Image (cartoon, grey):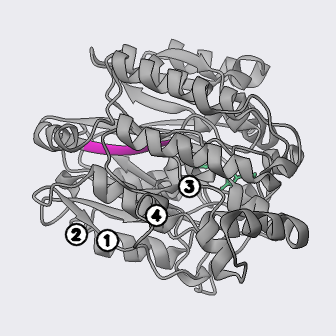
Amino acid sequence: MKAWEVNFDGLVGPTHNYGGLSVGNIAAAANAMAESSPREAALQGLAKMKLLADMGIKQGVLPPQDRPAIATLKKLGFHGDETSIVRHAAAVAPGLLRACCSASSMWAANAATISPSADTEDGKVHITPANLPSQFHRSIEPPGTAATLTRIFRDERYFRHHDPLPSNLYCADEGAANHMRLCAHHGDAGLEIFVFGRSTHSEVPRPANFPARQSLEASEAVSRLHRIRPGKSLFIQQHPDAIDAGAFHNDVLAVSNCDVLLYHEAAFRDWREMEENITSACNFPIHFIRATEAEIDLPEAINTYLFNSQLISLPDGGMMILAPAECQESGPAAAFLKRIVADVDNPVGRVEYVNLRQSMRNGGGPACLRLRAVLTEAQFEAVQLTSRVILDQPLYDLLKAWIERHYRERILPGDVADPSLLRESRTALDELTGILSLGHIYDFQTPWC
Ligand code: SUG
């Protein structure tokens, strides 16, 4: 069946800041409390989407979540009108307020896991929003994610939505950032690879310093919920040393597309076993492109986010790597990318670089910003009929003007104490749901609920 991979990118929200919130995320820790530019961040993300859309690649847009998360602050005991809530939280719990102001929903790879209809027993696209319990500021995303995804993927003939898994570390789920898929063509049945960092099983070693965010138990539950065809789910462990080195998600060190798996040899607990298991589960040949430690060492791989590149099928055949600009400035990363393009044994024929420095400083590269959905022609049309989230030139123009109209040039983490940021953000988001034809997806748009 004809199908495309559509990348839905998270639009960076108006409160984008460097709150120093994520344990185990080295870039975020290094930039904690630095000045950020929400406007530049949003324009950089939009420019990436436009670059791909102009190449004929189907590109979608996901709206940011409403921040500061007033509902969360209320649940934690703050009361009164919204201005008082923000002021009170700023005075007595500034770290909590920063967490409630994070624009972290921009990293859409953590929004959900999506299994294409070709992989599932009932022939539907299955969608499970990630519960994200490992970091507090991310654990408050799932209800907003579910509201957006059920609105965009609305047609019940094609899409099956599941609730996020129960919110606890036993079934800690980080979504597509720990999920890969291999297939001969996007529309064919594929192998779904769930990569976990932790488990209650005693034989699964854990990292010593940083949290392993994805649990095996969550991966197994998502695979069951999605009714993946028998024998077509594989569960692979991240290397605990990779997590300790700063690879808090598997997509920091590995990316797949169709029959290509690009990865660093330190990504998995046992890469030889991983290659063998994949090879025997697939009835088509796989191109494994492995970077050795000698080619690029683990700290440099994490520093450049080389493996957080997007690996993309081009409309005219072949594949392209969309790499962070940081890779261009790194000798080993640039040499590795050159070697892939020169190698005629794999389908990758082109590399493009993209400047996402605002997001990169919080540990989010090109692949973090997108949620992949493989859609058939009919499913894609259903999405287009119910909203306006597929990027074209007019939508790009509207979004660019919208960012320039509403976003602040600069903010410091302390600026989240300013109640006018809440008002500005809500004015912007209210207008955005109109631009994207999404109806009312934010609680503040239906205050009587
Ligand atoms: O969860 N950073 C995000 C980055 C997520 C990257 N996503 C993928 N690898 N798919 C995280 O650690 C930092 C927020 C702050 O500190 O302000 C943050 O949440």
Query: Label 2 belongs to which residue?
Result: 230
N-terminal label among 2 and 3: 3
In space, the residues marked 4 and 1 are separated at their CA atoms by: 21 Å
Magenta stretch: give its range. 370-374
Residue 164 drawn above or below residue 188: below
Please identify the quadrant where the C terminus is shown.
bottom left
For mark 3, give the secondary structure.
Answer: loop
Which residue is more in the foreground, 288 or 195? 195
Q: Nearer the viewer, residue 244 or 422?
A: 422
Give the CA separation, mark 2 to mark 3.
39 Å
Point 33% across, 36% down: residue: 389
Q: Tally the marks.
A: 4
Task: Give amino acid for label 4.
Answer: Asp
Badge 1 vs badge 3, beta-carbon distance below 8 Å: no
For the residues labelled 4 and 2, the Cα–Cα distance comes to 40 Å
In front: label 4 or label 2: 4
Above or below, 298 against 82 in this view is above
Task: Report the Cα–Cα distance between label 4 and label 3.
Answer: 9 Å
Disc number at residue 66?
Answer: 3
Is residue 174 toward the left or the right of residue 385 in the image?
right
- State which tag comes first along the sequence, 1 or 3: 3
Residue that badge 1 annotates: 162
Give, as a three-letter code, the residue at label 2.
Pro
In the image, the residue with mark 4 has its CB under 8 Å from the nearest atom of ligand 1: no
Identify whether 265 is placed above or below 262. below
